[in-house]
């Protein structure tokens, strides 16, 4: 059993639709904005830009190498191109163009990748993408943002205009439930972690779609007598190291939650900060355990990989039972 | 509009570029000589006659764009930019491939004045050229976008993705020059992975195709004049000889990456041969 997703009006509020709508609104004010897609105008919702401004959306057909090369060329002559395809094709099929044409030349190409993680469930591993955080983090000049819902997607799309270089944003298939009720209820700043809930016993650091479940898990933990802090790490790069170290010192226990291979993503980014900080902390990473997942409804896959609120809650309880080896460091000072 | 430069002046410049390639290679100990020598005449014709550019204002919005998609031939391209006035030629020749130099084996647009795109990985230039041409049209700028690829480079599928889109988008200002020197690292293109009938393939993708002897300045000039006057997308298949200018290099796969002698005396023999050629 996974999270029930049908209580929301997916058509109005999906991350994808919010992306297209926000982009078209921005484009009305900013003539530098153009779009490029590879036969996924509808699926990624970048088509909404084309409906508003037909001459500013270029569909290159099913050709992802050309997609990002063309985006780089448009950036070279002064535009801010938004290039959209499925995450797996952005990272791997056109990945070298993203790296060499866009990132190496530090061009303001905004790679807006949809259908990330296992959100395209039944499509199977050819269309899942559990490698993008690792790939994009490792590309110099790249900023990587994984919004938690449609509202954050809108916030990130607005914010990325001012990022001078290349930008990678990943959303799911776009039918995921919302974390927030409006853009007004939070402050979104690229590179700045967002605390969703305070707590003293453990910190759950999440990004992307499972963040809503992380928050629900945090509330469930209260009922079990565990005070959980929940942090929304929407920006994977540059990562908010300060927030991570603060969490380590405050709670000594951290669980990371990501719809990504446990290798190379949020968990490893957090681990790297922790190891270099010298602070005592125990970490558990929730994610896809380095395997190509089965087909299935995304909510079922979330449950399988403990990305559901229940799975996150159980994982945290396991971690609470673990001993943290005492040492004589006095890093609290 | 092309500049008014005579064929003899262009030929003299091409000879000068070949001498600079030799000297630069010698200073760097080795380099991608073969493709640089084969494409030298076309580069000179472009930069000294056809491309509407201003070295004093390299980011001028209305300039023509040029992408050296066969980026390993920075050995010809960057000295050519220097000769055109973008860079200090002596500095380029002295520092090519040196540690922390701006001038490496493949051109870096972030570091080289006048370089419109970073290249090196093959098959990237034409897609970027398509993007530039689309963007310039959207800005109502009527400039040309010229992309030079190698012939072996045409084996990269991304070129054909881009070619298909150039025709689809009716990019009338896009010019694709293929330096058809018949060789790639592992040997003859037709033996490694056959390209022919290249003209028919490019034509089938929606380009008007022109052909010339790319090592004969008068013929190269004629093709470029025709390309400039033709509503594109247009492709020039520039038939050339790899290593052109040095008999012992010509048509040899080994000239792809080689040196110009182990000492000044050996270099001088090469320089004298270039000077003596017609």
Image (tube, coloured by chain):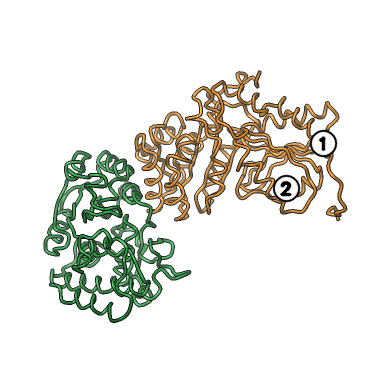
Chain colours: A orange, B green
**Residue pictured at 71% horizontal, 27% vertical:** A311
**Where's residue B30, x and y in %?**
35, 68
**Where's residue A214, x and y in %?**
70, 32
**Where's residue A36, x and y in %?**
40, 40
**Residue pictured at 39% horizontal, 37% vertical:** A53
Q: Residues within 10 Å of mark 1 (few under 14, many from 20)?
A: few
**Where's residue B32, x and y in %?**
32, 63
Q: Nearer the viewer, residue A162 or A262?
A: A262
| Front position among marks 2 and 1 | 1
* Chain letter of the residue beneath label 1 in the structure image: A
- State the mark number for residue A243: 2
Give a yes or no on whether discs 2 and 1 share a subunit: yes
A251 left or right, relative to A56 = right
* Chain letter of the residue beneath label 2 in the structure image: A
Q: Mark 1 highlights which residue?
A: A322
Q: Secondary structure at mark 1?
A: loop
Residue A17 visible in image: no
Image quadrant in which the N terminus of chain A is located: top right
**Residue pictured at 47% horizontal, 44% vertical:** A29
Is disc 2 in contact with disc 1, using a CB cutoff of under 8 Å? Answer: no
């Amino acid at each position: 059993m996974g999270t029930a997703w049908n209580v929301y009006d997916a058509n109005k509020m999906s991350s994808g639709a919010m992306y297209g709508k926000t982009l078209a609104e921005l484009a009305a004010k900013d003539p530098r904005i153009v779009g490029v897609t590879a036969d996924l105008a509808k699926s990624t919702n970048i088509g909404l830009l084309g409906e508003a401004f037909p001459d500013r959306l270029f569909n290159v057909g099913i050709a992802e190498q050309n997609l990002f090369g063309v985006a780089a060329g448009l950036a070279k002559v002064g535009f801010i191109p938004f290039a959209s395809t499925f995450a797996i094709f952005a990272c791997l099929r056109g990945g070298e163009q993203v790296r060499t044409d866009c990132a190496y030349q530090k061009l303001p190409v905004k790679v807006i990748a949809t259908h990330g993680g296992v959100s395209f469930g039944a499509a199977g591993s050819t269309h899942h993408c559990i490698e993008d955080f690792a790939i994009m983090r490792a590309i110099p000049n790249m900023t990587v943002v994984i919004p938690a819902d449609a509202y954050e997607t809108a916030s990130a799309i607005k914010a990325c205009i001012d990022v001078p270089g290349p930008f990678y944003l990943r959303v799911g298939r776009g039918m995921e439930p919302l974390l927030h009720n409006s853009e007004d209820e939070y402050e979104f700043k690229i590179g700045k972690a967002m605390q969703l809930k305070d707590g003293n016993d453990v910190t759950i650091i999440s990004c992307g779609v499972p963040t809503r479940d992380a928050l629900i898990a945090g509330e469930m933990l209260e009922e079990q007598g565990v005070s959980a802090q929940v942090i929304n790490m929407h920006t994977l790069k540059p990562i908010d190291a300060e927030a991570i170290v603060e969490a380590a010192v405050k709670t000594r226990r951290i669980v990371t939650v990501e719809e990504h291979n446990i290798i190379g993503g949020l968990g490893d980014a957090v681990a790297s900060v922790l190891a270099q900080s010298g602070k005592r902390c125990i970490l558990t990473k929730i994610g896809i355990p380095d395997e190509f997942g089965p087909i299935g409804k995304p909510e079922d896959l979330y449950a399988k990989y403990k990305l559901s609120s229940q799975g996150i809650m159980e994982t945290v309880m396991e971690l609470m039972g673990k001993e943290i080896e005492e040492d004589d460091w006095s890093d609290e000072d | 509009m092309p500049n008014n430069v005579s064929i003899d002046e262009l030929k003299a410049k091409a000879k000068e570029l070949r001498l600079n390639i030799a000297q630069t290679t010698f200073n760097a100990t080795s380099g991608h000589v073969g493709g640089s020598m084969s494409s030298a005449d076309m580069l000179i014709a472009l930069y000294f006659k056809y491309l509407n550019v201003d070295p004093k204002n390299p980011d001028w919005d209305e300039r023509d764009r040029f992408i050296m998609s066969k980026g390993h031939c920075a050995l010809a391209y960057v000295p050519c930019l220097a000769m055109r006035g973008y860079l200090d030629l002596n500095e380029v020749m002295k520092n090519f491939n040196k540690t922390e130099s701006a001038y490496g084996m493949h051109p870096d647009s972030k570091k080289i004045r006048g370089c419109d795109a970073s290249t090196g990985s093959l098959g990237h230039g034409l897609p970027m050229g398509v993007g530039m041409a689309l963007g310039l049209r959207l800005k109502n700028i009527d400039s040309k976008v010229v992309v030079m690829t190698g012939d072996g480079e045409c084996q990269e599928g991304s070129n054909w993705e881009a070619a298909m889109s150039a025709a689809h988008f009716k990019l009338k200002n896009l010019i694709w020059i293929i330096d058809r020197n018949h060789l790639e690292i592992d040997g003859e293109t037709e033996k490694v992975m056959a390209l022919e009938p290249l003209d028919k393939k490019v034509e089938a993708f929606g380009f008007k195709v022109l052909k010339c002897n790319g090592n004969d300045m008068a013929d190269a000039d004629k093709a470029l004049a025709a390309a400039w006057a033709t509503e594109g997308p247009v492709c020039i298949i520039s038939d050339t000889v790899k290593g052109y200018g040095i008999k012992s290099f010509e048509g040899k796969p080994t000239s792809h990456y080689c040196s110009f002698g182990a000492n000044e005396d050996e270099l001088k023999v090469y320089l004298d041969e270039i000077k003596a050629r017609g």
